[in-house]
Image (tube, rainbow, N blue to C red):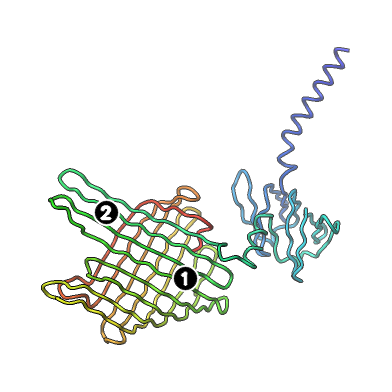
Amino acid sequence: MRRSATLAASWCVWVLVSSFFSAPAANADQVTLKNGDRLTGTIVKSDGKCLLLKTDAAGEVTLKWDAVSAIVSSQPLSVQLNNGQTLSGNVTTDDGKFAVTTPDRGQVSAPRDAVVAIRNAQEQSDYDRLQHPRLIDLWSGLFDTGLRETRGNSALLAFSLSAKAARVTKRTKLSLYATSVYATDNTTPPGRTTANAIEGGARFDYNLTPRFFVFALTDFAFDQFQHLDLRSVIGGGAGLHVIKTTNTTFDVFAGANYDQERFSPNPPLVLTSITRNVAEVLAGEELSWKLNNRVSFDERFTAFPNVSDLGQYRFQFDATAATKLKSWLSWQVTVSDRYLSNPLPGLKSNDELLSTGLRLTFGKGNF
């Protein structure tokens, strides 16, 4: 009797141990390659060119779709066909066909060549939102901070804050931005402000084709030490997506704008306020480059030749390198340059900024 009880207990322990070690495999998706290799994990998506598999051991793994011979999913997947139909359910492959076990129609088969995309539940939800997004959907954003303070023989405080937000769909991109720079020097009383500038604006891009786009923009700027009370710009133009890949985008663009600048007096050289109303053309380029999963580089340059006063011009340059510390936190270094060829008498043309600090992000970071 004791022996039977011991055998029964041993059998129960063996079953529990076996279940413990086999559960992860049973609850994982399985991908078999044409060379015989077999990978387990969670299928995220496929676009007909690559398949993204999230594994416990290696993280996200990208596989060439042509190298995949079979898949078995433990989770419901959405399989999009080339006729526009989407099948949802657990997926297996057999003899070059996809078998999808749907909750309402049972098992439905489709040829492999008819499959244009595969998505898990989260990816399908994001895809559906992208087809008919609300205005509050699809936003991404970031906040860049920079702070420098000294105490003792010198008493300096410099602070910079930048914010960007973008809403990107297949055909449109709405971008908002704002930047503030402020610095004080209290080394010798009384304290004085040494920098005080604010910029902001918005831009709307519309893709006429996958490579060609048009845009409209508006910009505003204030700079205390340039005696610029307000610069307001409205304009538009067209551009070209020269490079548009997952890790790299490079755009060139050109257009025209109307610029109104209001300057306060700068005694004793300038005793009255000055308002300039000028027409400008604009031309520029924008680069966004992901070196790897942690490091990214963004750069933008725009020139504004003055057509109302030939020979005069201004330009804007911004470059930022960011290293990701967490999914929502990065360390960034930013270089900016603002140049005006015809400032008020007695003032310099160039305003440069070097800032470093933390970056906070939300959304998917598509700007």
Say which residue appears at 38% left-offset and 80% top-offset: 282
Given the image, on which type of amino acid does mark 2 rest? Ala
Q: Could you tell me residue 58's position as x and y percent?
A: 59, 46
* Residue at mark 2: 158
Give the farthest residue toward the front. 272
**Residue 330's spot in the image, x, y percent?**
43, 51
C-alpha gap between disc 1 and disc 2: 33 Å
Dot 1: within a 10 Å radius of its alpha carbon, few (fewer than 14), some, or many (20 or more) residues? some
Name the residue at the top extreme: 2
Q: Is residue 17 left or right of residue 315?
A: right
Q: Nearer the viewer, mark 1 or mark 2?
A: 2
User: Horizontal and vertical percent for residue 211?
Assistant: 54, 77
Q: Could you say whether the residue bearing mark 2 is in a helix, strand or loop?
A: strand
- Pointers 1 and 2 in contact (CB under 8 A)? no
Q: Amino acid at mark 1?
A: Phe
Apparent side of residue 107 relative to residue 41 in the rendered image (left or right): right
Q: Quadrant of residue 284?
A: bottom left
| Dot 2 alpha-carbon crowd within 10 angstroms: few under 14, some 14 to 19, many 20 or more | some
**Toward the viewer: 61 or 327?**
327
Query: Can you tell which mark lies on residue 250?
Result: 1
Comparing 302 with 270, the one in front is: 270
Marks 1 and 2, the one that precedes in the sequence? 2
Quarter occupied by the N terminus: top right
Where residue 162 sits in the image (x, y, percent)?
38, 59
With respect to residue 167, does 93 lie above or below?
above
Q: Residue furthest right?
A: 1
Q: Residue sitting at 34 percent across and 69 percent down?
A: 317
Dot label at residue 204: none
Name the secondary structure under disc 1.
Answer: strand
Left or right of residue 115: residue 61: left
Q: Is residue 186 left or right of residue 218?
A: left
Quadrant of residue 270 within the rendered picture: bottom left
